[in-house]
Each structure stands twice: as C-alpha cells, then as structure tokens.
C-alpha cells in the first residue's frame, strides 16, 4: 500500500497545530531510502526515484491537510514558546492498527519558524538518519529515519550548504513541551483534550485506571529513565535535553548536537552552546528527572485537587525514580561487565570506569577488551584480580562492537559534500549489525587529528 493517513492530532483544539504547505522543490534527489522501514510500514512505493520523492514529499496526496505542531519548552532551563519551526506532518500513517507520525524535517518555514529559515543542512540530516537508525539497531527506542532527500537548494549557515529533508517516523511527537504549551493556555478543556488524547493514543491501557494521570506520570518516568540507562549503556550524549526534546512516547528524539563517547569522561559535553555542562554524559539522569518535574507541573491539578498534596506525591515518585535509576544503572553496568547482579557491584564498576577515565580509554572498546581478555594488564592488573573473585553471568548483545562514532559521521558528511557517498552507503549497512559486525575500520577510535571536539545546534 501507499500512505494510509488517518490524522487524529488535528482533532485536537486548533491551538495545538497550524496547517501548512511544504515548499516545492524542482529537482529533489533521493539520497537515502530505508527499505527495511518502508517494509515495516507496509509501504510499497515504485522503484522510480522521482515517484518515491513525490510520495515522500506529499505531492501525491490530494485530500490531506499538512500541519505543524505548537509547543513550548525549557531550553537550557529557560522557558520559551516554540513549535515545529522546520517540521511538517504529512500525516499519521496507520498500519496493522499501529499509528506512525510521518514528518518532514527541513521542508520550509512554518508559523513557528521565528527567525529560522525552516531548512536543514544535508550534513545534519545525514547525521540524524545514521545516528537514529544506529540507535534503533542498538535496541534503544528512537524516532526512525525513512529517507533523506536532497532539495537542490543551498541553505545558509556559517557558509552555504546543500539543503536536505529528513522523513522522520515516530510513535508520536507529543513532548513534555506540548503539555507545557497546553497548560500555559490556562483553559481547562483544551488541556484536558490533550491529556486524554495522549493517553488514548499512547497508553490506552491506562484509560480505565482509577488515577490514570498518576499512572501516566509514572509510566513516562519509567520510560525516560530506562531510555537514559540505555543511552549510558552505549555511551550516547543527547546534547540538547530540553523539555521540547523529551517525547512522551519514550523514544529518543532530536539528533542535533548529539555524539557518542570515544574516550570515557563522565563530564563530557560536545555541544558548543552547553557552556556549563548541563547536558553532560553523567548529568543526563538528573536532567531527565528535572524535565519530568516540569511535566508533572502541568498535571498537578489532575493528580490531586490539593496542590500541596499533589506536589508531595510527585516529589515522592521522582525520588523513587532516582532510586530506580541507581538500581537499574547498577544492573545495566553489571551486565556490561558480565557480573551476576549484586548491590555491591557498584565498587568494581566505579573502579573500572575510573581507570577508563584516568587512562583516557575508549568507552566502547574497553568493554569489548574485557570480553576478549585483552585489557591492558599494566592498567587493569589489580582490578582483574578483584574481578576474577566475583560471580559471572554471560550476557550477549549488551556491549556493541560498533557505534556511530563522530569522526566517521563527520567523514561521511565531508565526503557527501563532494558527492562521494561510498562510505555513507557502507556505513548505512554496518549500523544494522552493531553487535555482530566486527569491521575494524569502524571500531578504531579517532586519531588526534580526527577527533571531534564540538558539535553544533542550529543545523
Ligand atoms: P531543536 O534544537 O532542533 O529541538 O530546535 C529547537 C526549536 O527551534 C524547534 O522549535 C525547531 O523547530 C526550531 N528550529 C531549529 N532550526 C530551525 C530552522 N532552521 N528554522 C526554523 N526553526 C528552527
Ligand atoms: Mg527539537
């Protein structure tokens, strides 16, 4: 089938979205098309590139109304009214009773563009395609990438760059920031329709629960903390954990200044605008809880009519999720070290990470060296003695061989800008087997000259 759009979001009060039309591009070029995902969505487009582009850009859709979402958010702690400044929904594609948002990112201005041009650079869309797909194959919830289309237009950043559109697929794009926007309006009916919509769409099993709003909050907390633990398992730094970039579906969303750790450093920050390390590797769980508190603020009145009581309930839940994180982080790390779980594992885990930090070792590869018995004896001798006295439990598929390292992504982007896509197409296949592919070319950490020190937003 082709698209099976059945939009539900536009049944919400119209303050939550605006109808928009994607810009027309004379000669769009299909750079990346995710056949596996297209099959999962039961999409059978023809093999004709121009026709696929037409479908992906919504040209063949007559009756559908495209729209962009309104939202707000705390960006680096400051509250702002935002909205899809460069994203347009083609619609909600329904397949096998599952609903997927199909969104074009970088397709042109919307009423929420503020001072932006509504466009995206080819480099940043290639990055999102590869990193989000890698995330999926690392078994971590994420939005997916169906395609990257080169628009043929140049977009101005520090210099002119080729423009591109990413076709993004998500369970939903409702964010903490959507609720912040809804609660800002102070109109009870309009807020209630958003929360009921969210429960019906994402967590229908909660519909008949007695305090379903509290259950929703706990569910979101659990999904987010699990997500952060998964990010930390593979060394991922999101880089811009603003409340508008936290999805209620529990999927990783928005691959802007994100990056994976090479050398282990818990304080590592890549984003050029994150001067104080707010979104550093080790700060991610704290920030997730901070964002969750912002979400809770919007639904306090539904948790208990007595505000003080509601705050107390929320605080207790957040405290429990702090404990939940500590316990499950320990569990995840024990698995990475193939240790039988025990609360006391914390010491051996910390010592392992400290050695990695002090000796500037590669996060991904050091876990693999442990598995291969090839840890540097000079560094780990004492640690290995302690480790060998513990109980083991072999876990498979926990430590990836291959992550999308920054220097590889940068090289792919640089090559692409000279119309050389060989490495891009090679790596697109490699990321599908992060636990079994052993290609050294993608396992070697960057040399000093290849290291990426900073990543940039506003892409
Ligand atoms: P992000 O950091 O990608 O979450 O973006 C933050 C906000 O800025 C979102 O509301 C985006 O839609 C908007 N934005 C980012 N880049 C652009 C752009 N080039 N033009 C218009 N809006 C943008
Ligand atoms: Mg965003």
Image: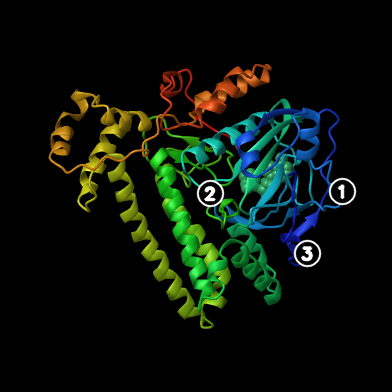
Of circles 3 and 1, the one toward us is 1
**Residue 429: percent from the left, percent from the top?**
54, 27
Which residue sits at x=39%, y=42%? 233
Return the mark for residue 241: 2
Of circles 1 and 2, the one toward us is 1
Q: Look at mark 1 in the image and give the residue it sits on.
A: 62
Which residue sits at x=43%, y=26%? 437
**Residue 384: percent from the left, percent from the top?**
17, 33
Of circles 3 and 2, the one toward us is 3
Q: Quadrant of residue 77?
A: bottom right
Task: Give the camera-side residue of 418 and 156.
Answer: 418
- SS type, badge 2: loop
Locate residue 423 relative to residue 276 in the image: left or right: right
Task: Give the camera-side residue of 280 and 102.
Answer: 102
Image quadrant of ligand 1 equals top right
Mark 3 vs mark 1, CA separation in Å = 21 Å
Q: Look at mark 3 in the image and give the residue it sits on.
A: 14
Mark 1 vs mark 2, CA separation in Å = 37 Å
- SS type, badge 1: loop
- First in sequence, mark 3 or 1: give its number: 3
Residue 456 vertical position relative to residue 216 in the rendered view, above or below: above
Say if residue 451 shows up in the picture.
yes
Q: Quadrant of residue 69?
A: bottom right
Q: Quadrant of the C terminus?
A: top right
Say if residue 267 shows up in the picture.
no
Which residue reaches farthest bottom? Answer: 306
- First in sequence, mark 1 or 2: give its number: 1
């Amino acid at each position: 089938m082709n698209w099976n759009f059945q939009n539900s979001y536009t049944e919400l009060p119209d303050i939550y979205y605006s109808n928009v039309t994607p810009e027309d591009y004379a000669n769009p070029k299909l750079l990346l098309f995710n056949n596996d995902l297209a099959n999962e969505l039961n999409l059978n487009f023809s093999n004709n590139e121009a026709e696929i582009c037409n479908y992906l850009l919504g040209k063949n859709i007559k009756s559908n109304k495209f729209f962009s979402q309104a939202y707000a958010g705390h960006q680096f702690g400051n509250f702002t009214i935002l909205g899809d400044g460069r994203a347009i929904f083609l619609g909600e594609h329904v397949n096998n009773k599952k609903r997927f948002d199909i969104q074009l990112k970088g397709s042109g201005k919307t009423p929420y563009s503020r001072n932006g041009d509504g466009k995206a650079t080819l480099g940043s869309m290639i990055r999102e395609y590869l990193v989000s797909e890698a995330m999926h194959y690392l078994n971590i919830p994420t939005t997916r990438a169906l395609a990257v289309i080169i628009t043929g237009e140049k977009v101005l950043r520090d210099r002119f760059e080729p423009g591109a559109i990413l076709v993004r697929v998500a369970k939903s794009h409702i964010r903490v920031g959507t609720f912040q926007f809804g609660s800002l309006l102070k109109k009870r009916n309009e807020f209630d329709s958003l929360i009921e919509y969210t429960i019906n769409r994402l967590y229908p099993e909660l519909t008949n629960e007695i305090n379903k709003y509290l259950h929703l909050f706990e569910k979101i907390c659990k999904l987010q903390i699990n997500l952060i633990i998964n990010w930390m398992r593979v060394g991922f730094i999101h880089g811009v954990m603003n409340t508008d970039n936290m999805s209620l579906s529990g999927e990783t969303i928005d691959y802007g200044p994100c990056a994976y750790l090479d050398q282990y450093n818990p304080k590592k920050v890549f984003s050029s605008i994150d001067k104080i390390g707010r979104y550093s590797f080790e700060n991610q769980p704290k920030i997730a809880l901070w964002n969750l508190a912002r979400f809770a603020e919007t639904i306090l009145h539904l948790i208990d009519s007595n505000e003080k009581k509601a705050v107390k309930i929320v605080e207790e839940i957040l405290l429990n999720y702090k404990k939940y994180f500590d316990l499950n982080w320990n569990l995840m790390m024990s698995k990475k070290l193939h240790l039988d779980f025990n609360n006391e594992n914390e010491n051996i885990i910390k010592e392992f990470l400290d050695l990695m930090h002090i000796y500037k070792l590669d996060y991904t590869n050091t876990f693999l060296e442990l598995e291969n018995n090839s840890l540097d004896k000079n560094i780990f001798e004492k640690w290995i003695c302690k480790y060998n006295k513990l109980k083991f439990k072999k876990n498979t598929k926990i430590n990836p061989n291959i992550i999308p390292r920054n220097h590889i992504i940068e090289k792919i982007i640089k090559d692409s800008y000279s119309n050389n896509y060989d490495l891009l197409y090679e790596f697109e296949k490699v990321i599908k087997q992060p636990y079994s592919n052993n290609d050294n070319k993608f396992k070697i950490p960057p040399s000093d000259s290849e290291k990426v020190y900073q990543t940039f937003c506003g892409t």
